[in-house]
Amino acid sequence: MTDEIAGKPVPRPTEETRDYWEGCRRGELRLQRCSECRRVQFPPRRFCSSCLCARLESFAALGRGVIRSYSVVRHPLSPAFAGDVPYLVALIQLAEGPTMMAGLRGCTPDTVAVGMAVEVEFEARSETHVPYFHPA
Ligand SMILES: [Zn+2]
């Protein structure tokens, strides 16, 4: 497993994303909710993207969503992904509302579909964990 992921990019948490990546390491997909307008947002930011309020609370999402679009990657971004092609990357609308991009596992270009229900899993990559989704 370690050899398979050697060379793949490792996320570098920033002040805005540290809580998110620490959540991933614990097996939680964390989102932000605005204390003022209650809007849920992803990716994490310092301010609410709707009302610019800086009071944001972080919470663990259900980790479930629906595929809104997907792409089949047949040419790897880097040699580290050469063993993975073809692989799937999807836009997933989370149950809480925001849409995120993530890799898909447990389905193929022949079995994936827009509207498919998916749930999150995490791949250990160096010191952090990276979210992927698989059919629910
Ligand atoms: Zn707001």
Image: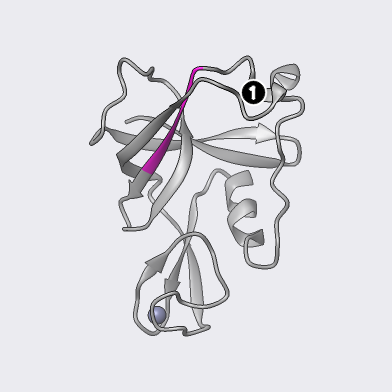
User: Hey, which residue is sitting farthest left in the picture?
Assistant: 115
Dividing the picture into quarters, in which one does residue 40 lie? bottom left
Horizontal placement of 48 versus 117: left or right? right
- Does the segment drawn in magenta span residue 89? yes
Decide if residue 67 is on the left or right side of residue 56: left
- Residue at position x 25%, y 34% from top? 114
Horizontal side of 111 relative to 12 (left or right) equals left
- The N terminus lies in which quarter of the figure? top right
9 is higher (above) or lower (below) than 62: above
Compared to residue 20, the image places residue 51 above or below, namely below
Answer with the quadrant where ligand 1 appears in the image: bottom left
Question: Which stretch is magenta?
Answer: 86-91
User: Residue at left 44%, top 74%?
Assistant: 49
Nearer-the-camera pick, 51 or 73: 73
What residue is shown with label 1? Answer: 81
Q: Amino acid at mark 1?
A: Phe
Taking depth in this image into account, of 97 and 113 the one nearest to the observer is 113
How many C-alpha atoms fall within 10 Å of the one at disc 1: few (<14), some, or many (≥20)? some
| Residue at 75 percent of width and 18 percent of height | 3
- Magenta-highlighted stretch: main secondary structure? strand
